[in-house]
Image (spheres, rainbow, N blue to C red):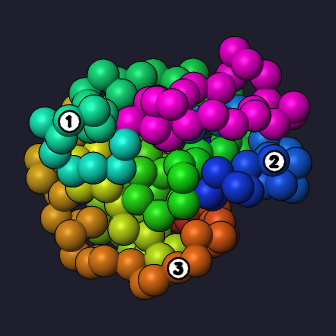
Amino acid sequence: MTGIVVCPLASIAEMAVRHRAREMVSLIAERQDFHRPGVISANRHLKLAMNDIGFAGTGDLVAPSETHVKSLIGFVRDWDQSAPIIIHCWMGVSRSPAAAVIATLSLHPEEDDFALAARLREAAPHATPNSRLIEIGDRMLNRGGRLIAAIKGIGRGAETDGRASFVLAPRPRNKAKS
């Protein structure tokens, strides 16, 4: 698997060009308008309209749902992985890191949740994955609470100015000894 590039909305064009991405997932408020980078074709751009909240029932705000996570998993499983994929939200701190973890586990269910969470923290000291997305992802990917525990274990991320991007690289492969 090539890497998952996680970034804020303001960096999508730069990151798409720099990493030669051809696919993108946007986790952004329903009425948030933006231009899709020209290197990303419309049919390989998934927009998941949601707000960065942890629970439903907050007026006009849209909470992350099973429908969102199901769409994310389906889209990522259809990704040919020949080039990186961009996953972004408004600031690249909560929704997109959660989606990157869910994407990784949907492609590599053998991945250890705690090792993945540690890689996330190393790559993104600022990441504080959206708890609702993580809980739904844990359930839909049959993680048995391990994903929830792993993400809780890394705690809240460091403060950021919203310009931090990172790559969640694939798990290092064990090399056979010769």
Q: Position of residue 95 (x, y in %)?
A: 42, 51
Q: Residue furthest top?
A: 43
Q: Nearer the viewer, residue 109 or 22?
A: 22
Q: Which residue is mark 1?
A: 59
Q: Residues within 10 Å of mark 1 (few under 14, many from 20)?
A: few
Which range of residues does the magenta coloring cover? 27-50
Q: Nearer the viewer, residue 112 or 23?
A: 23
Circle 2 or circle 1, nearest the eye:
1
Magenta region includes residue 35? yes
Which callout, 1 or 3, points at the residue further toward the start of the chain? 1
Q: Amino acid at mark 1?
A: Gly
Q: Which residue is mark 2?
A: 13
**Disc ID at residue 160:** 3
Q: Amino acid at mark 3?
A: Thr
| Marks 2 & 1, CB-CB < 8 Å contact | no
Q: CA distance from mark 2 to mark 1?
A: 32 Å
Q: Residue at x 21, y 50 (%)?
A: 54
Work out which quarter of the rendered image holds the N terminus and state it: top right
